[in-house]
Amino acid sequence: MKNHWLETVLKDLHQEAFHWSRQCCGFDEDEAKDVLQLVYLKILEGKAVYSEKSLIKTWLFAVIRYTASEERKKKLDNTPLDQINDLAYKEDEPEGPDFPESMMLQLPDRQKEVLLLVFYHSMTVEKAAEIMEVSIGTARTHYDRGKKKLKDLIEKTRIEK
Amino acid sequence: MMTEHDKELQTFFHQMKEKNGKIQVPDFPELTKKSSLNWWIPMGIAASLALGFWFVSEKEPESGLQHDVIIITLEEDANNEMQFKIESTTELESWESSTSSLLTEFQQK
């Protein structure tokens, strides 16, 4: 009964979950698909259990964020040292000045995450803090700094135009 | 929490959402399908065990006589004369000792 309910809710949240997974994977679609598969597998196997302490969306987003960071760490551990610098350079390189995602990639991870959760996924800073596993105070600091930095980047792009 | 200054950011993220709308989201995987597959494991074990038991019971050796047995008995006929009765068989369901008559005759006497 609970599994069926969980499946229905996950189905409803699937689209949003995919976009969040993509955002956690540096906007890489293939990596996002793999991470989401792993998340569903974790839920199915009972490795990730919803304890009903938070909203299901908050819980799901936290599992996705954790799994994505786990996978990225694994990937980095398996990358030879001489390729790590190339990877970092590739990620920071914007594809085009107007492309919003490349602008987001210029923000530090925590700032990027809190802004995406609040503005893109319409969550409160409190919920974002829960997903990011930080205190509300820390989340607010990242939120304020991120907003300022993103505004500066938008302004800079406008001037360059 | 949102201020007037955040409107610029809202527009920025709105544009991002619009762009993301063109991305094809993969289909939601069938979660229950995988769990039904797990039934094959206990079913497979049960089938293997049943097959194993069948083979074991099938191979049980039959208890038969290795050679033909000749049974020689001494019986008294109608004229009170002793006669040999010779029989040959491959099965021996009941066997009576040839000297058992001595025991019964001795008791009668």
Image (spheres, coloured by chain):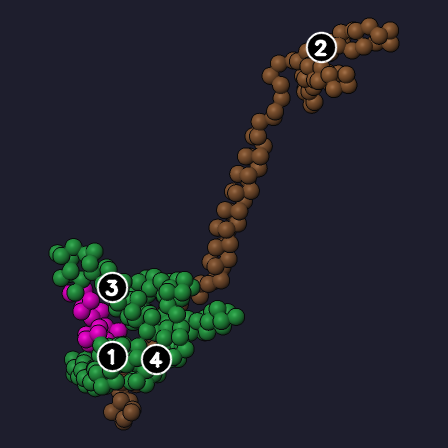
Q: Secondary structure at mark 1?
A: loop
Q: Which mark is residue A72?
A: 3
Question: Is A50 placed above or below B11 here?
Answer: above
Q: Nearer the viewer, mark 3 or mark 2?
A: 2
| Residue picked out by circle 2 | B72
Q: Nearer the viewer, residue A86 or A132?
A: A132
Residue A94 lies in quadrant: bottom left
| Residue picked out by circle 4 | A121
Q: CA distance from mark 1 to mark 2?
A: 101 Å
* Residues beneath discs 3 and 4 located on the same chain: yes
Q: CA distance from mark 1 to mark 3?
A: 20 Å
Q: Position of residue B57 (x, y in %)?
A: 58, 34
| Residue picked out by circle 1 | A134
Q: Which residues are magenta?
A: A89-109
Q: Position of residue B38 (x, y in %)?
A: 48, 55
- The colour applied to the residues of chain B in this rendering is brown
Q: Chain of mark 3?
A: A
Q: What chain is the green one?
A: A
In magenta stretch: residue B12: no
Q: Secondary structure at mark 4?
A: loop
